[in-house]
Image: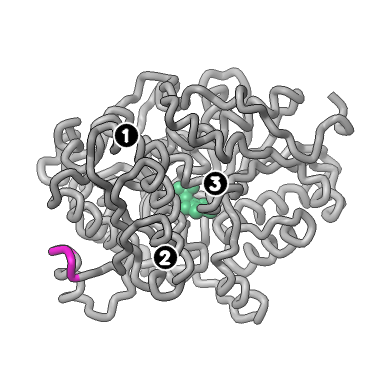
Amino acid sequence: MSNEKIPYKIYLSEDELPKQWYNVRADMKKKPAPLLNPGTGMPVTAEELGHVFCDELVKQELDETTPYIDIPEEILGFYKMYRPSPLVRAYCLEKALDTPAKIYYKFEGNNTSGSHKLNSAIAQAYYAKKQGLKGVTTETGAGQWGTALSMACSYFGLDCKVYMVKVSYEQKPFRREVMRTYGASVTPSPSMTTEVGKKILAEFPDTNGSLGCAISEAVEAATSQEGYRYVLGSVLSQVLLHQTVIGLETKTAMDKYGIKPDIIIGCAGGGSNLGGLIAPFMGEKLKGEADYRIIAVEPASCPSLTRGVYAYDFCDTGKVCPLQKMYTLGSGFMPSANHAGGLRYHGMSAILSELYDQGLMEAKSVEQTAVFEAAQRFARVEGILPAPESSHAIKVALDEALKCKETGEEKTILFGLTGTGYFDMYAYAAYNDGKMSDYIPSDEELQKSFDTLPKINK
Ligand SMILES: *Cc1c(COP(=O)(O)O)cnc(C)c1O
């Protein structure tokens, strides 16, 4: 089809919403390495995981062979409130860049939580409710996941306890209040409400907290209370599974107009939005049916794919979660105060780590001043104020589009626009005031953190 016929926004109808999630592991010849019990070094069993996670989610986590998993009606019903999400042809951006490239983005910021995280939050809350639980516990860094989960829990009438990284709790009072409005209780982490929190505070009384530490507290809070389980907003394979709704919708919309992306770009924190966006495309690539260039974009301040090692590591600072083989900076790595809170995790999804290790995707790291420059450029012509996390993908999409301008190539570029940035105005203020810094960890710093990897690798 000719370009003229492609609308600014490609909307699908409700009937075109995917009815199943796609489990890309089923089509991987070499699967991600199994999760290990940190005590025994043996693969974790469903029974062991069942103490921490909901039963149905454990099943999804361990399922490497079922390619398609039905989305329950109740979840589809919720999805219909804000999905299908639009796939946008960035005509205005193309014009502003004067590039022959065709740019598309899948916009996931069109819901109150402001990001793609709601896609998995609603699924996890549903399975907790179905199991008859009282509630769930979780951690949140910048607050997007906690916000999404509190919305999902209030929909299903579940209690929601959120451990929020202390520095964010203090600096991001608005997200905290959205969570409380939806009925969640929000505790700054580390706290005195858990044993692991007390231990961390005794050792580091002035700590600002970290994601890894908040995870440990949330896991303890779940396992020490009757009727509670722990839920996680990224990294795990079940979360990538739920997020495939992004990629499946994108593929349906593109197929309708005969569009085939040459390059697919996404920001990568724990890897869930990128994993979800690329899943159906990666599936074709794995089966040899099509080829795509896929790029994960991460902050230069927390470069797990580009500078990390592929090894078994702890998922949390308290070392209570199973060991996962992933690209990691070490669970003790304390990233600098980068403004993209959602990209500050030390490790990466096991699925994406394995795909990257097999050379099926690339990774780039970008510095935050350049990211905000791209965010501003995008906001001024496309009318959406992007989240700092999402702007990492924008930055690389702009770079690729500008390369096309030099070479005259009409490449089709697709990127994931994961959310909006209205709660990140301090970050925008720092950029607008010219006070933003670009911190890049030294090799020595990273080595110190690698030295703390579990011995199982040796
Ligand atoms: C959490 C978040 C991310 C990063 O998480 P992934 O699991 O890597 O997708 C990206 N963008 C936004 C807006 C987020 O909230």
Q: Is residue 60 magenta?
A: no
Whole-percent x, y for residue 162 in the image:
32, 58
Residue 282 against residue 346 in the figure, above or below: above
Whole-percent x, y for residue 425 in the image:
59, 71
Residue hosting label 1: 127
Q: Give me the disc on residue 176.
A: 2
Q: Report how far apart the C-alphas of labels 2 and 1 lie in the structure.
A: 25 Å
Residue 234 visible in rendering: no
Residue hosting label 3: 296
Three-letter code for the amino acid on which mark 1 is drawn: Tyr
Q: Nearer the viewer, residue 207 or 27?
A: 207
Residue 295 visible in rendering: yes
Q: Mark 1 or 3, which is nearer the eye? A: 1
Three-letter code for the amino acid on which mark 2 is drawn: Arg
Whole-percent x, y for residue 116 in the image:
52, 45
Question: Which quarter of the picture shows residue 72?
Answer: top left
Q: Residue at x 29, y 32 (%)?
A: 130
Which segment did they paint magenta?
Answer: 192-196
